[in-house]
Amino acid sequence: MTTKPTILLAADLPDWTQQELHALFDVIELSADAAAAQAQLKQHGPHIRGMALRKTKVNAALLDQLPALEIISSYSAGLDNVDVPAVKARGVVLENTSHVLAEDVANTALGLALAVTRDFINADAFVRSGRWPEHGHYSLGHSISRMKVGVVGMGTIGSAIARRLAAFGSQVAYYGPNRKPINLPYYDDVVRLAADCDMLILTCPLSKETHHLVNTEVLAALGPRGFLVNIARGPVVDEAALVAALANDSIAGAALDVFEYEPEVPSAFIQDRRLVLTPHIGSATQEARRGMAEHVVDTLARHFGLAGPRAPAAHS
């Protein structure tokens, strides 16, 4: 009888996904209780060869308890909960779902950009309040087609956003640690990019280098006619600096899908009608989330040479 590979389920995944994993693997479901989790790792850690991950923190200490680990398959685009250098140093394969969710996140970014520049949220409230007959025409918005837009982080998601912006007619430039083999203006200084753009869209991963990347200096460079869209991670933006910029009317508006201490959102953001606020829904479509879950299973199955049963598409 062939022994199934042992994997650690360190993720809250849909029931059908867990059923597929259990059909393929000997699954150790990591307890939410710290003491119980340590007992599990002490007993099973030496035999665990794969991990299905979501938000659990993966650091050197955890990896030391998993000496046979070969692969981590993460149900996420961001890997800010993973010590990537430590994983790579151990030769562990690290997979995420950025390519699966890129199109839906890019759609969210463009939706937010349009909402904040055309003031759709307040315009909706204007109609619903019955003020249209009395007040007549609504105030004018701004055309994204006539803007220069800076994309901060030209990875899979950033590239998908850039394609959409080009279709809208926007001028697109980008910032990142390295120039990409693409025909778009590249900036190695985010302050200079902000100064040259009407809008910044943040798609970069969260790291030590990008924590509070958008600070007082960047916001000042973006200026009172500039817009900010964040679908990356909340701490990429210094929220105190953004609150100050809004209070001083030194930025036109912002659309934020992520927050530094989410789900807590600064009251200054909630009270400011120049902001569009959404609850971290960048990839939150039924189709994207199913694709992400399937990718977690399929990546692990391929690694171990297994053919996974595919759940019916009607499941969610």
Image (spheres, helix red, strand yellow):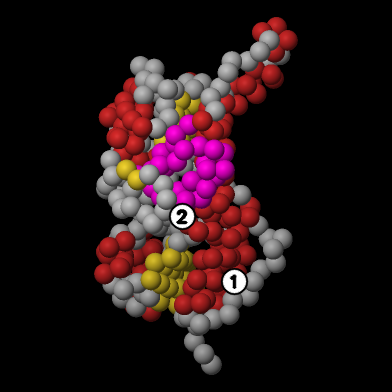
Q: Which residue is mark 1?
A: 20
Q: Residue 75's spot in the image, x, y percent?
A: 49, 59
Report x, y in % for residue 58: 34, 61
Q: Please indicate whether residue 25 sits to the left or right of residue 181 in the image.
A: right
On the picture, is 141 further left or further right than 126?
left
The residue sitting at the front extreme is: 183
Density class for disc 1 (Cα within 10 Å; few <14, some 14-19, many ≥20) is: some
In percent of the image, x 34 and y 37: which residue is there? 193
- In the rendered image, the quadrant that contains the C terminus is bottom right
Q: Which range of residues does the magenta coloring cover?
A: 147-175
Mark 2 residue element: helix
Q: Which of the two discs, 1 and 2, sits closer to the camera?
A: 2
For residue 246, say whether it is visible: no
The one of 188 and 315 positioned closer to us in this rendering: 188
The total number of labels drawn is 2
Q: CA distance from mark 1 to mark 2?
A: 28 Å
Q: Which residue is mark 2?
A: 156
Judge whether residue 133 can be spotted in this image: yes
